Each structure stands twice: as structure tokens, then as C-alpha cells.
Image: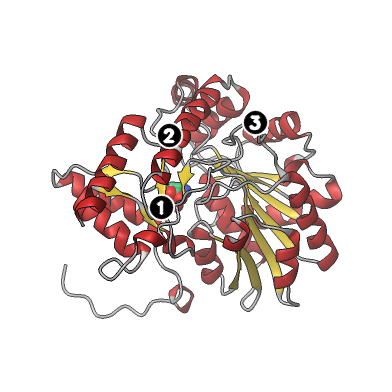
Amino acid sequence: MTASRNIELADRLSKMTSSSTLRVLQMTERLRAEGIDVISLGAGEPDFPTPENIREAAITAIGAGFTKYTAAGGIADLRRAIIERMRRDFDADFGMEEVIATVGGKQAIFEAIAAIVNPGDEVLIPSPYWVTFPEVVHFCGGTPVFIDTEPEDFQLTAEAVRERLTPRTRLLVLNSPNNPTGRVVPPEEVRRIVELAAERDFRVLIDDCYLYFVYPPVEPFSAAGLPPELASRCMVTGSFSKTYAMTGWRIGYALGPAEWIKAMVTIQSHSTSNPTSISQYAAIEAFAGRQDSVREMLDEYRRRRDWLVAALNEIPGVKCLLPEGAFYAFPNIRGLLSGDLPTSRALADALLEHAGVAVTSGSAFGAEGYIRLSYATGLDDLQRAVERIRAYLDRR
Ligand code: GLU
């Protein structure tokens, strides 16, 4: 290709940066391709295979020829399966016009924000936050307004939301269990937050990505099950990627007011057309079929969590809370930072280069002084990774 002139990119990209979690994944893959042994605790990707019944459902769909365009918002059978599952688990009451199937939870989040945020609108985002939230707000010309939850051990409260409201507040993005902290907002607090949204006239986008990965005594809770007058303030987005180890299938969903959903279908009809037909059939089986694999994965994640958090807390200079959900440990590593390692990014880079362990820096999630370790990785690898980290820190 001949050398290109500088491309003048659109203004809407001026503040958008690429995904830090996916960057760590790509860096790990590149190093492995060069023959370097890297233990990946970077991107949150389940190490389990997609359960067999789900893979079989996809193969059956291909055999039956379901390989063509579908309705932009997803086939009726999948939308019905999502509504049914939310009814069964959370007593939620949604109609067929209030649900959309999407290309992963990420597309649902993108469309939900793009459908209602105007340039100049403020979007409240509790921090630490998943890397994608502020970037999508930037893309839409909105202004992210962060609510720092670190002083409250990462617990978001309605009071903290109230303090950051302004006449320009359009939306709050709530992610519980939270990526990266694993914190769960208790149901009564979610209710208070949504009541505040009704009182002060803003909307709430609830990212349920880790909905089913909570550790006892915490139980799954979705705002989809709030009474209709409150649920109608919200857009609840979900994903099959984590719960069913289906990251590559790119399939997710959203439930919310019909008008908001309709706008999302319009965006979808001009971007991806529809989610992949085969993935939609697989997702029906995921939600309607047997759930033993989810319980098995959760038990294994809990075993790993307990081991990893205890092991991290034994490292001098590291303090780690016990996550209530998701599959990330998010230790405070300020005690390790010094002259040659001044930031969490510098530490993450050093661990990759000198210890062969990929982690994500806290700064990517708006939390300098922390790193994120995904324990969606086998216990053997977690043990080897901690040994390598300890050995690196000892020889510094
Ligand atoms: N959500 C996962 C993570 O936070 C996967 C990568 C991504 O989509 O951000 O690592």
C-alpha cells in the first residue's frame, strides 16, 4: 500500500480511546506467538468451553438452515426466551416490544447510550468502571461524570449519586456485580437509585453482564424485576458471554421501555443488521436449557477467588477485598509503587515484561493504585502467576 496522507478523523473520535482490556489480550497473544510464556490474567474471558448443549443447538441450527438474515432486533423465539427467563428468575414483566437481542452485551450498551445521550448531556459513571462506558459516552458527545466509590470500599449509594446530579444529568450507568471490583450493589440500594432517577428525571442503564456470577450469600438480582414504574426508568443489558462462556459468539440482549428499544433496533438495523442467526439459536438453549454448567463454573470461580485473594493479601504492599461477584481480583497495590514503578500501568507493564504475567492496570478503570487480575483462569495458572509475581517483587 502506498504511504497514506494523514487521515482527518471525525471529531467524535477525538476523545475515544481503544479498549485497554482488549489491548492486554492482544499483547498477550502477540507475545505467545513469539514463543514467550505468558500467563494471562488480563482480559476477562472464561477458560471453560461453551457448554455442549449450547454448541449442539448451534450445530442443529446450521443443519436446519437458519443461516440467513433475521429480524434486526432478534428472532421472536430468542426474545421470548429472554423474557421468560427474566420472568422466572426475577418476576420481571416485559413484552415482546421491550426486548432486543444484540451482538454481545457491548452492542446493547453502545446502542442504549447512543439512543438517548445528546452532545452536552452528563452521564454518571461510578468509578472504578468498565473501560467501555466512558468511551461510548465520549463517542456520543456526552460528558462522563465519575462518582468515586473508592472511599466507600467501592460501594455505590443513592446518596453519592444524588450529590453528583445536575440539570444536565441524562443517564447513570450502573454495573453490578462491578467489573473490575466485584462489588454488588444491594437490591434495596438499586431500588433507591432508581427511585431517585424517577424523582429527578434521569435514566439508568444497568449492565447485568455478571448477573449470575455472585458468590453466596449474595444472590442474583436484576433491576428488570423492579416494579414496572421503576423498571421503566431503566435499560437492563445482559450478556451470554460470561455466564455461558460464549465470548466469541457475540450475543447479548437488553430489556427496557419500548420506545428506547425501538431506537436501538433502528441503530442495529443500520450497523450489524442482526446478531448472528446461529448465535441466537445457541442463546435460546443457553437461557432455556439446563443450567448445571453455570453452577459448576461458579463453584470453580469461588474456589479460585478464595485462593487468589488470600495469596494476594500475603504479598507485602498488597491489599485486596473479597469480590462478591464477577471473576476479578482488584488489589490495592500502592504499597508496591515507588520511583521506578510510579504507576499501576508501569507495574502492569513490568509484570508482563519481567514476570510473564498479564494483568490490567487500575488506571484503565479510573482507579490508579490498583491492578485487575482475572481469575477466569485455571488454579494452576493462578498459582504459577502469583509465584512469578512474588519472585519478581523479591528480586527488584
Ligand atoms: N469484559 C471483559 C473485560 O473487562 C472482556 C474484554 C472487554 O470486552 O472489555 O476484560
Tag 3: Cα neighbours inside 10 Å, few (<14), some, or many (≥20)?
A: few
Instruction: State the SS at label 1.
Output: loop
> Which-is-in-front pick, marks 1 and 3?
1
Q: Name which residue lies at 55% across and 32% down.
A: 283
The mark closer to the camera, 2 or 1, is 1
Q: Quadrant of residue 142?
A: bottom right
Crowding at mark 1 (Cα within 10 Å: few <14, some 14-19, many 20+): some
* 352 sits to left or right of 133: left
Residue position marked by numbered label 1 in the rendering? 318
| Residue at x 27%, y 40% (from the top left corner) | 387
Q: Which mark is residue 77?
A: 3
Q: Position of residue 375 (x, y in %)?
A: 41, 39
Please, what secondary structure does the residue beneath circle 3 have? Answer: helix
Gap in angstroms between the C-alphas marked 1 and 3: 48 Å
Q: CA distance from mark 2 to mark 1?
A: 15 Å
Q: Is residue 58 left or right of residue 112?
A: left
Which residue is denoted by mark 2 in the rendering? Answer: 307
Nearer the N terminus, badge 1 or badge 3? 3
* Residue type, mark 3 in image: Asp
